[in-house]
Image (cartoon, rainbow, N blue to C red):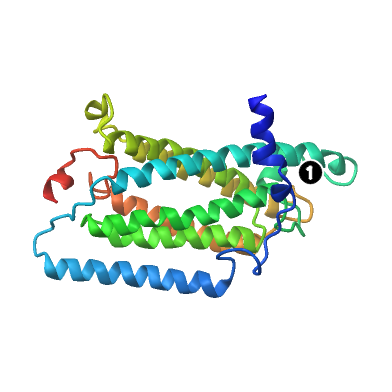
Amino acid sequence: MAAAAAAYWLAEHPAIVSFRWSPTGLWFSTWAFLLGFLASYVALCLALDAILAAALRRRRPLTLGPVPAAHALLMAAVSAVIFAGTLLSALAEIRDTRWSWRGRSRTTPFRWLLCFPPGTRSSGRVFFWSYAYYLSRYLHAARGLFAVLQRRRGAAARVFAHAASIAMAFLWLEFSQSFQVLAILASTLAHAVAFGFRFWVGAGLPAARAARGAPVALACQCALLGCNLLCHVGVVWMHFGGVAGGGCSGIGAWVFNTLLNAALLWVFLHCYGKRGVCDDDGGTTAARKDL
């Protein structure tokens, strides 16, 4: 009974089934809003970082109280819902469209997950959850502001990483980019685990002190980067190797997405190249002692 209700609300509700990406009628769905927000977000964070650096000669973090922990709990819950909705919606789409693949193309469920057929429109179940994921990137961007206020090293790199994440999610919808289903599943699963851990540590729940040094966020980030790399290799193989027939949908946006992922990889190496520079697990690392 509970499973049927969850399947209805997460994959079969009319608002989900009939979803269509459009620059009119949807929040934050225009290029003008995207570019305006990204410019304002980056400028605000960098200006705030400069002001705090001038006002506070020593790298002393501002106390945010329970706000980061509450935000981590919210992000964990949102990520878990998007993961469940995307998974159920992908299974429902495969179930409903499998018949159309027989005899007309060589598409299989695995190939569909990696390579949307050319001409795919951003409508239906999986794109509803892609839109939900896109909206969640704005909520996630608050972590960049927290990093600035807490005077973390590498805060500027984090801000640019969050801005790039929002841009990528927008491109997925705008150009019906391939492999986004797997990318959303991997990302939301990693975020649900990492943010759940951050809330656990930040709220001081039982056994939290013993777990403070566990590199959970680092492990999730490594797993996510590995999954993205495999997905990119799969898209290259299917599109340029002729496996997908007519190619993959949104390949132009995929090229730009690849460049953004390369930039995110640089941010990752910059943050974790030195122990604790971008630590966000709540651990007592050497860099945290310098704050």
Tell me where residue 174 sits by quadrant.
bottom right
Q: Is residue 62 left or right of residue 188?
A: left
Q: Is residue 91 left or right of residue 72?
A: right
Q: Position of residue 164 (x, y in %)?
A: 45, 61
Number of numbered callouts drawn: 1
Whether residue 43 is situated above or below residue 20 in the rendered picture: below
Q: Amino acid at mark 1?
A: Thr
Looking at the rendered structure, the secondary structure element under dot 1 is loop
Q: Residue at x 29, y 55 (%)?
A: 146
Any part of residue 84 in sight? yes
Q: Is residue 122 left or right of residue 259?
A: right
Quarter occupied by the N terminus: top right
Q: Residue at x 33, y 39 (%)?
A: 198
Asked whether 81 or 35 is in front, the reply is 81
Q: Residue furthest left?
A: 57
Q: Position of residue 19 (x, y in %)?
A: 70, 54
Q: Local crowd at mark 1 within 10 Å, few (<14), some, or many (≥20)?
A: many
Tell me where residue 26 sits by quadrant.
bottom right
Tell me where residue 212 sits by quadrant.
top left
Any part of residue 179 in sight? no
Q: Position of residue 182 (x, y in %)?
A: 59, 43
Instruction: From the image, tell me which residue sits under label 1.
Output: 107
Asked whether 75 or 242 is in front, the reply is 75
Q: Position of residue 267 (x, y in %)?
A: 36, 55
